[in-house]
């Protein structure tokens, strides 16, 4: 026997949407899965989710979560959270990079400082040893020749001057680091400073067989600047010119006016500097990384002090140099008085 319903080809069941909604709201499983508000919409409403093949043309929407369906909400959350998470990760990585860079810089500076301490000790030792040796020789009266004795005394005086220059550099550096360096500008004849510096360097230059060619332009007005600081700066440049001259024995010192500036140039024809190092040599403790440099003593302070002085006077320093060709350091100082 067959049921009467089995003979019917097609059965249409009509369900009122309100009844369906009420039934779903009473269903614990459904409420647990979708705790918010919901309502039904026609199948072509893009804000809803289709209910499946048994309810074609019917969509369900969830106004409680901004009208989005759960998958729409997830899409929205994903499009919102993914950039936020990416931003947080990027910021964390950037922070880590900055930290790493700071730590690396601090380590490098610590290494340069300790190298500086050993360089200063070494540089102090050289003139001190000479002073002691010549003083003891004089005391023991090994030579009775007054000319030789004068020579020994000269060496003692000049080596003491070298010692003072080095100590002045260290003291100036320490004042600059503490922000206590004060320059005392006064009307100064650049011509006189050039001559005084050349006199101070006469002894070390001649002892090592250097010839210093000085060229100065006439009619230069006095310039308002710290005379001692300028002299110290020129002594540093001339000492470097000697130290880095290699086999050359010629140094030029020029004073001229250029485009409204007083220009002092110190030129040597020695080992020169790689253009990639031109910026960094003015940094404190920095010494160019070259095989020649490793054999030469130095603290890495001289040029940083020159640059600080020139900047404080409202001027600038420039270097023109290439390996094997020598170097020219140019100090541009403002001609107009600055108080
Ligand atoms: P120091 O000479 O004590 O090392 P400086 O600050 O005076 O320190 O110079 C920094 C670096 O610049 C030197 O180590 C050297 O590499 C380079 N330099 C300076 N002057 C010259 C020069 N005249 N010729 C070649 N290199 C130079």
Image: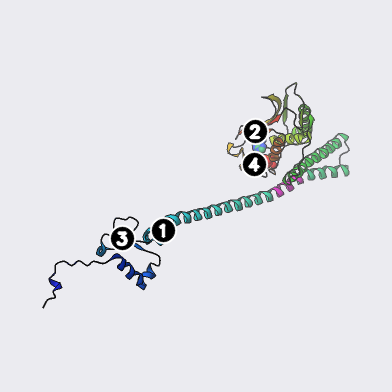
Q: Residue furthest top?
A: 219
Question: Which percent across, then down, holds residue 49?
Answer: 33, 60
In front: label 4 or label 3:
3
- Dot 2, how many residues are within 10 Å of its Cα: few (below 14), some (14-19), or many (20+)? some
Name the residue beneath numbered marker 2: 318
Please report contact status of discs 3 and 1: CB closer than 8 Å, yes or no. Answer: no
Task: Let me know if residue 117 is in the magenta part.
Answer: yes
Which one is earlier in the sequence, the residue at label 1 or at label 4?
Answer: 1
Name the residue beneath numbered marker 3: 59
- Quarter of image, ligand 1: top right
**Span shown in magenta:** 116-124
Image point 14% across, 72% down: which residue? Answer: 6
Q: Is residue 244 visible?
A: no
Marks 2 and 1, how far apart at CA: 66 Å
Which one is earlier in the sequence, the residue at label 3 or at label 1?
Answer: 3
Which one is earlier in the sequence, the residue at label 4 or at label 3?
Answer: 3
Q: Quadrant of residue 124?
A: top right
Marks 4 and 2, how far apart at CA: 21 Å
Q: Secondary structure at mark 1?
A: loop
**Ligand 1 within 8 Å of the CB at mark 4:** yes
- Dot 1, how many residues are within 10 Å of its Cα: few (below 14), some (14-19), or many (20+)? few
Marks 1 and 4, how far apart at CA: 71 Å
Marks 3 and 1, how far apart at CA: 16 Å
Name the residue beneath numbered marker 4: 293
Task: Let me know if residue 97 is in the magenta part.
Answer: no
Residue 66, label in figure: 1
């Amino acid at each position: 026997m067959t049921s009467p319903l089995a003979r019917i080809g097609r059965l249409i069941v009509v369900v009122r949407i309100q009844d369906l909604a009420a039934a779903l709201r009473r269903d614990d499983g459904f409420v647990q899965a979708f705790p918010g508000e919901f309502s039904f919409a026609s199948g072509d409403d893009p804000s809803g989710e289709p209910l499946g093949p048994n309810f074609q043309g019917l969509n369900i929407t969830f106004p409680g979560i901004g009208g989005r369906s759960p998958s729409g909400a997830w899409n929205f959350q994903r499009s919102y959270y993914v950039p936020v998470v990416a931003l947080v990760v990027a910021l964390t990585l950037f922070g880590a990079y900055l930290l790493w860079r700071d730590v690396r810089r601090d380590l490098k500076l610590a290494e340069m400082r300790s190298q500086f301490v050993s360089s200063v000790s070494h540089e102090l030792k050289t003139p001190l040893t000479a002073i002691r040796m010549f003083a003891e020789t004089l005391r023991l009266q090994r030579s009775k020749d007054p000319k030789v004795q004068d020579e020994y005394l000269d060496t003692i005086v000049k080596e003491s001057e070298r010692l003072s220059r080095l100590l002045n550099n260290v003291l100036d550096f320490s004042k600059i680091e503490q922000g206590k360096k004060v320059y005392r500008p006064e009307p100064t004849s650049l011509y006189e400073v050039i001559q005084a510096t050349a006199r101070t360097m006469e002894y070390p230059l001649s002892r090592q067989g250097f010839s210093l060619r000085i060229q100065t332009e006439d009619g230069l007005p006095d310039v308002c600047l710290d005379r001692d600081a300028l002299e110290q700066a020129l002594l540093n440049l001339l000492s470097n010119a000697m130290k880095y001259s290699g086999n050359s024995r010629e140094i030029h010192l020029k004073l001229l006016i250029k485009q409204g500036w007083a220009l002092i140039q110190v030129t040597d024809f020695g080992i020169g500097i790689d253009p990639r190092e031109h910026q960094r040599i003015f940094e404190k403790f920095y010494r160019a990384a070259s095989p020649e440099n490793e054999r030469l003593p130095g603290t890495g302070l001289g040029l940083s002090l020159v640059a600080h002085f020139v900047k404080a006077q409202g001027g600038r320093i420039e270097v023109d140099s290439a390996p094997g060709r020598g170097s020219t350091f140019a100090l541009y100082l403002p001609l107009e008085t600055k108080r």
